[in-house]
Amino acid sequence: MPRGRVLVPWSMLAVRVALGPLLFGLTWRGTHGWWLAAIIALHTGLDIADGMTARRLGVATPRLRRADSAVDTWFYLWTLAAIVRRAPTVLSAHPWLLGGLLASEAARHLLDQSKFGWSAAYHMWSAKLWGVALFAGCAEALVTAVPGPLFATALVLGLVTNTEGFAASLVLHDWEHDVPSVWHARVLARRRAAMRGDAPDEPA
């Protein structure tokens, strides 16, 4: 695998890693919310681009896909800290949704670690939709500094995404990456089981 091709998506990941602390630092300095929203937009664009680039270059390895998921978590933890700093009322307006989302994230991580030894990197369709909602919701929070519908929608979609990811991890027997939906996870699990000769019987 040519080293130059591998470095392209990894370099984009490195930029995304740096954007999280930068966002929080600018929030601490009182930077205008639209600049903070621009950083979230840049991260979202790079998140989309690095996956597409990796697949186009043929370097979408499991290690890279795991790193991509980890960087998403890293960036949005910094974003959460930025919202705590700039707009705490946005979080206090939705305690149950926020608590449920964080609990579901932790539950997914524990399940994946105990079952596969790695966190999941499914990059499901629902997760892609959630990524767009997170951009919109977090940008809304940092620009307006008051509770709004976009942030609440992002929390709800996060719960839906984590529920689907949890279900996929229950269905799959082996660690997989880039699984579009729980339906695809079920099909993949049956295919893997058939290859091993232990596929379950079809329902009557």
Image (cartoon, rainbow, N blue to C red):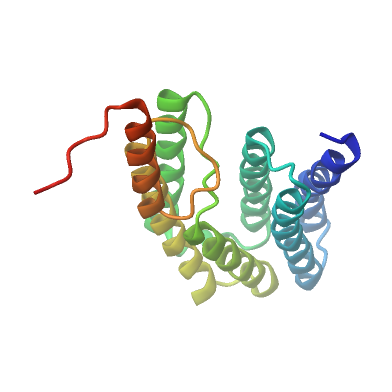
Q: Can residue 148 be seen in this view?
A: no
Q: Can residue 67 be seen in this view?
A: yes
- Residue 84 relative to residue 94: left or right: right
Q: Which of 31 and 35 is in front in this view?
A: 35
Q: Nearer the viewer, residue 5 or 25?
A: 5
Who's the residue at 49% across and 49% down the image? 179
Q: Which of 56 and 171 is in front in this view?
A: 56
Residue furthest to the right:
4
Would you place residue 196 above or below residue 32 in this image?
Answer: above
Who's the residue at 40% across and 32% down the image? 111
Give x and y (percent) for residue 11: 85, 44
- Residue 31 relative to residue 119: left or right: right
Give x and y (percent) for residue 7: 86, 40
Give x and y (percent) for residue 90: 54, 65
Q: Which of 65 and 142 is in front in this view?
A: 65
Give x and y (percent) for residue 31: 83, 64
Would you place residue 102 above or below residue 27 in this image?
Answer: above
Quarter occupied by the N terminus: top right
- Residue 100 relative to residue 77: left or right: left
- Residue 54 relative to residue 181: left or right: right
Q: For the image shown, how many numbered marks are present on the structure?
A: 0
Would you place residue 135 above or below residue 77 in this image?
Answer: below
